[in-house]
Image (cartoon, coloured by chain):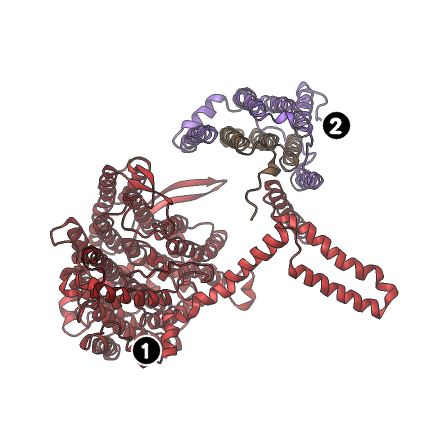
Chain colours: A red, B brown, C purple
Amino acid sequence: MVNFNDVNYLPWLIPLGPLLAFAIIALLTNRSRLVPTTSHEYGGHHPDYDGMLVPVVAPWSRVLSIVVGMSGVTAAWLMSLVVFFQGISTSKLGLDEKVFESSRNWLAMGADAFRIGILVDPLTVVMLFMVPLAVMCIFIYSIGYMAHDPRQARFFALISLFAGAMLTLVVADNLLLLFVGWEVMGVCSYLLIGFWYEKKSAYRAAIKAFTTTRVADVIMLLGIVYLHSMTGTLSFRDILYNEEVLTMLAGTPALIVGSWGISAAGLIGVFLIIGTIGKSAQFPLHVWLPDAMEGPTPVSAMIHAAAMVSAGIYAIIRMYPLFEAGGYPHSGEFTLPLLLMAVVGAFTALFAATIALTQNDVKKVLAYSTISQLGFMMAALGIGAYIAAFFHLITHAFFKALLFMASGSVIHAMEHGEHHLHEHHDEEHSDHAHDHAHDDHEAHDSHDAHDHHETVGEPIDRDAVDEPVEPHFDPQDMRNMGGLIRNIPVTAWTFIIGGISLAGFPLLTAGFWSKDEILADAWYVWSETSSVVHIFVFVMLVMAAFLTAFYTARQLSMTFLGAHRTEEASHAGLGGSRSIISITMQLPLVILAFFAIVAGFVGVPPDFPIFGSIFAPDGNPFFNFVKYSLLTEMQPPKPPFNAIPVLASFAVALGGLYLGWRMYGRTPLKAGEPDPMTKILSPSVYKLLQNKYYIDELYVAIFVKPSKWFAKNVVVVFVDKGIIDGTLHLIARVFTWIGDLFKVLNLWLIDGVGDGIPQGIIKFGAWFRRIQTGQVQQYLLLVLVAVLLVGLIFAVSAGFLQAAG
Amino acid sequence: MGVPLWMYLTVAAALFSIGMYGVLARRNAVAVLMGIELMLNAVNLNLVAFWRYLTPFNMSGQAFAAFVLVVAAAEVAVGLAIIIAVYRNRQSVEVEDVDMLKG
Amino acid sequence: MNFGEGLTPQAIAFGLFTILTIGGALGVVTSRNLVRAAIWLMLSLFGIAGFFVLLSAPFLASVQVLVYIGAIGILFSFAVMLTRGMTNLKERFNTQWWLAAFAAITAFALLMVGVIVPVFGTTVIPVADQVTTTVDLGVALVSGNQYVLPFEVASLLLTAAMIGAIVIAREDD
């Protein structure tokens, strides 16, 4: 049935490798036994709960799990390569019939059926180059990074499932299958962010990520359901390459809000975009992403670069004609979804970049830069530059995966240094009761730990969290680093390559070309049509790009340049250049560094001076390849070369990098010296940024506190203990008071009623408290009552309809 | 074949409602499970009746009834095991005594 | 009662099975003694098996007798005896029984009004007398185009349920 040479079938098998690997590891090779966290077998971590039982896998299980996981992802990578090369050798893959696809019935439902299938068009081909490659690098890296973890088998199982879900999403030919991959990734992100679940902060971050994206996913599901009810299909090609359907969707007023001039396409688009806002961490729902850094670093790379956040943008690019239906952004006609994307994206890009300026945690800087870069893509999608956005998605995935893994290496090296120092100190300690260096070190630690607790403002509610009080060294704090380029040169140089690519260092790096394309598109349409949205996006993104270059320079300088700021930093290392950890953790960096440079040259504009004639003699190759995945009239115009956006790119990238270097690189920070940014920004603004505009605190105040209050007062006190809560008292009192008032007003009339109401309220409270008793049958009864009510409403409305029609 | 379809549907509806009452009102967990069995059987009766009267050449009605049977068997096995485990731990099979979900 | 062509043997059988099913069901939800309830349950399920025969689904009827009455009924009896449930006869119903009764009656009324009244009285008769046989069902269950995948999943489910039941009910580790 399945022919390996037939590209119409091969994509079916791509997600299968990692998925099978997950099944095999989870069912067969993951053999562990429970040991208490205090045991010596469980070393190297700082659990918040002593004596908790944790599973520890046997050595053979580790090796076997790595082998299985690697084979799965390698198989996926090889098959993806076959599809990739066949894809790029097929001219005009996409619009004409040459797309690779096949599908079969999945779920028969009466006359209709949900289908499951694969679709390979230019978008998929490009993703199939990037995703498996990045994922494979992450796998290789994980071998070294997780080498001493007691639950390695579990890690490889989950990360395989993650990769399988992402590949499913990439090759899916309909929205339903895409959503399946999307949700499985959500579960995996939950499990992986909370991988070190014996740490309180880790499992809290996991819950936060899961619930935040859940809010968005439910709304996205609403959009999917609405789309299905309107069109009867969820297949991409049936909807997006069918102008009739698109015109119909754009012409029909939406369900409830139609009277406000919103079309069905607009409402569906907004719903789907809200899903992406959650998954790709855009402004109101971005809060989960920085906390997701609690997971192991390969997971951060996976979530933030290769897979999850890209999935959100990819889904939008996939469904792009739907968002564009009824408008034409290239002439300034915006639909509601496009406007939403442009505004949210541009705002997020700048907003997150300002936060990244002041973060001291090496991974948090990258986390906020991810949010900011995703904002670039959203904004580009909003102004119709969807090819530019896709290009940036690809280049960003390469350099951001590189940056995360390099930062993981840095952290690993710092931990190594700390470990080394501890042994060293212990020796000294036994010799001299009080050693000067030791005292110094202790003082340092307490200072760092203090700051750390201030800056890493994660915990959802501070008052309830009892964080460990004893000072402990933070290997992720950039203020503890400095001069690491001498300890870990390979990591440092690849980190620098990734960093300048992120900053958009002109001409050489991938980040420059993709960012420049977005800016060029925005500028071009503005100059043609003077569309306000385009110039708004342009200005916001230019500022964000400047800040990006600046904080990148700050990060690079603080981490690698200058003198070692702590003793840990001077002992940092990856355990010798020939150790397996050192090799597996640095090889992927080199591979990704290569792509962080060259990936940009596939998207050089043809009329760019000198470079255009070298890399794009027959027009922009990336543009020419991808453009066939859209209907012809929707393709964005190719902006001609214009010096202004290019000069702007040059100026902000070089200017930002120079300023950053001048502030942090030329005169490196001394140990314990405050950040020079404090002076420039004034302490209050600095504090505001460091606390991320207090968004977390705001959400705690708005959502978490009230529901906790409700749970505590209404459910626990009022319901469970049978004491009527203050609110009820208050209501009763108010009613009594009203009753009294009435009594005074007309005594003889109200006597019965005025007493009756408070009595009734109290009785209602006493009756209502039964609602949360833990009794299954009562819950069931409530469910049934709700179902009956819905049934009654339907019956009544159907009766009305019959009477009317 | 003198019996019209609506009669089967009425019997099934009655059976379903009686089973539902059992699920909601009985104290004993085993009796609650019995109520669930009654409800599942009502569904099965509907499936088979519709199959026979509306689409006798399409096997989906019978096939689904067979699957419901399988699911019911699995559900009873696990449900009774849970009841026995609960009984062992709490010395009770009263549903009202199992209220650990209470906040 | 309008039985179409008067009291045919099928109509008589239908009435008998209705009494068995509904009577048995009422017995299940009302009897104090749980062993009796289990026996009432078997009776009710036997009535359903009778309906299956009437509806020319002999395979399902036999499975109903084998699985439900043979296996599940016995399982229930064992569970009742193992938990000594029948000795605890103080209260049959919980405090919300009247609400439950009301809800059940409303549900029944809603089903009648919503589903059955529209087809009430219309003597829909079976499309054909000669319908598919057990062989067809067997083929459908293992045919690649029809139900082989759900079939396999169902077997997996049974296996999982069996293992799960053993694990849950096992004394201790």
- Residue A760 percent coordinates (x, y): 75, 55
- Residue A527 percent coordinates (x, y): 32, 79
The amino acid beneath tag 1 is Thr
Chain for disc number 1: A
Furthest residue in direction right, as rendered: A748
Comparing A767 with A27, the one in front is A767
Q: Residues within 10 Å of mark 2 (few under 14, many from 20)?
A: few
Instruction: Using the numbered discs, state the Cα–Cα distance from disc 1 to disc 2 in whole angstroms.
Output: 91 Å
Chain for disc number 2: C
Furthest residue in direction left, as rendered: A578
Q: In this rendering, would A590 be left or right of A759? A: left
Q: In this rendering, would A701 be left or right of A743? A: left
Q: Residues within 10 Å of mark 1 (few under 14, many from 20)?
A: some
Which residue is pictured at 56% across the width and 66% down the height?
A259
Q: Quadrant of the N terminus of chain A?
A: top left
The amino acid beneath tag 2 is Met
Q: Is residue A602 visible?
A: no
Label 1 secondary element: helix
Q: Quadrant of residue A362?
A: bottom left
Q: Is residue A702 visible?
A: yes
Q: Quadrant of residue A565?
A: bottom left
Q: Which residue is mark 1?
A: A678
Q: In this rendering, would A487 be left or right of A371? A: left
Label 2 secondary element: loop
Of the numbered discs in the image, which one, if any, rests on residue A708?
none
Comparing A380 with A39, the one in front is A39
Of the numbered discs in the image, which one, if any, rests on residue C1?
2
- Residue A215 percent coordinates (x, y): 47, 57
Which residue is pictured at 67% across the width and 55% down the height?
A724
Comparing A532 with C29, the one in front is C29
Comparing A805 with A780, the one in front is A780
- Residue A621 percent coordinates (x, y): 21, 63
